Amino acid sequence: MIIMNRNTSPIKPLTDEQIVKVVQDTTYNQYPDQERQRFIDIYAAAYDLNPAEIEVANGSDEWIQKVIMTLGGNGVMTLNPEFVMYTSYTLQVKPEILEVDCEPDFTFDFAKVARAIKAQKPSLFLISNPHNPTGQMFATEDLQLLVDTMAEVDGYLVLDECYIDFAEDYQRPVGDNIVILRTLSKVYGMAGLRIGMAIAQGETFEKINKINHPYPLNSLALNLASELFSDKRKLNAHKTYQFESKQELARILSQVKDLITVKKSYTNYVFTYGDLALDLAQFVMERGFLPRTYELEILKNAARYSIIKLEDYPAFNQAVMKWREKYAE
Ligand SMILES: Cc1ncc(COP(=O)(O)O)c(C=O)c1O
């Protein structure tokens, strides 16, 4: 089966030589102190951030759990649908998660979201931008409304930018109650190494770091992550491959947009929905491609496809076009 349900990179970013060199040079007999700071400095330089406002953990997953534990005391709210782990981690420590449903076309009415925040006063709101699972990018003014409304109820907004490298950069909302989450699991191709970053300022940064381990990540993962940024040309080629892959994925699925709705995506996956969306998903599954389908009621007619190796697209294209024939007049 070719995996299209994980939103990960289909290729690895480092050569075997780079990996051997990093392993040889890693002083794994010592605790990983300098390695952590070195990676944070490199990441901060790459994105023009203040290294003092960045901390690492085991994937953004761990950050999601940590922000729920440190900021979610008076309730956690999110969109529906959203990244499934927001719900899973909330239900580890709370009886419920508060949700605001999407509209029938999978957009969100942010005035409605703001009203729900004012009525229920959660202390934490989690949102992914670009959005998982729909792939859309939210407008700055909508995000600013969320930040300001959360501030009114003394709460925090987590802006999960897991897929940001697949989008164009955007004007971020402002506020000292914002936490931004990033990861090396997607465009950077290191999902297995579990490297996630949180970016926040002042008291917000202090609060989310209250429950840290002394050495949040191991030295090998940190050094491999630092190595990733050491060769800009190679890194750009790694990213470009995936951008091309995304374009091809979107092109292939656009050929059936008269039969299913194919949402414009700012991520490494494409979201489809409609009466025939699951039929296509089932059809390509029978031909060796595994998209993401859902049990959740709101997503029962949806399927999401993430990028694959360029060499696998001809067969995927063939499967999609064969499915089209079923509905030809
Ligand atoms: C929106 C979003 N946030 C966070 C994650 C988890 O990323 P990580 O591998 O950094 O834990 C994912 C993974 O699919 C995701 O889609």
Image (spheres, helix red, strand yellow):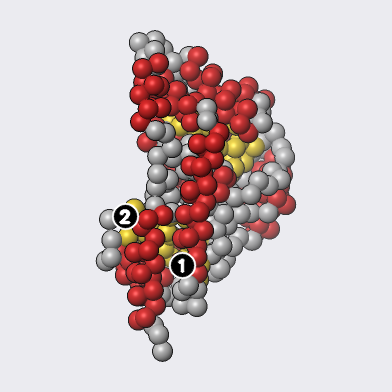
Residue at 28%, 61% in the rendered image:
288
Neighbours of disc 2 within 10 Å: few (<14), some (14-19), many (20+): some
Q: Amino acid at mark 1?
A: Leu
Q: Is residue 307 above or below residue 281?
A: above
Compare residues 136 and 65 and report the one nearer the observer: 136
Compare residues 255 and 104 and report the one nearer the observer: 255
Question: Which residue is tagged 1?
Answer: 253
CA separation, marks 2 and 1? 16 Å
**Position of 102 compared to 299: left or right?**
right
Question: How far across and how far down the image is residue 161, in percent?
Answer: 56, 43
* The N terminus: image quadrant: bottom left
Q: Could you say whether the residue bearing mark 2 is in a helix, strand or loop?
A: strand
Question: How far across and how far down the image is residue 20, in percent?
Answer: 35, 24
Q: Is residue 217 visible?
A: no
Image-quadrant location for residue 218: top left
* The C terminus: image quadrant: bottom left
Q: Is residue 59 above or below residue 83?
A: above
Question: Which residue is tagged 2?
Answer: 2
Q: Of callouts 2 and 1, which one flags the residue occurring earlier in the amino acid sequence?
A: 2
Q: Amino acid at mark 2?
A: Ile
Q: Could you say whether the residue bearing mark 1 is in a helix, strand or loop?
A: helix
Residue at 63%, 22% in the rendered image:
52
Residue at 48%, 18% in the rendered image:
35
The mark tally for this picture is 2
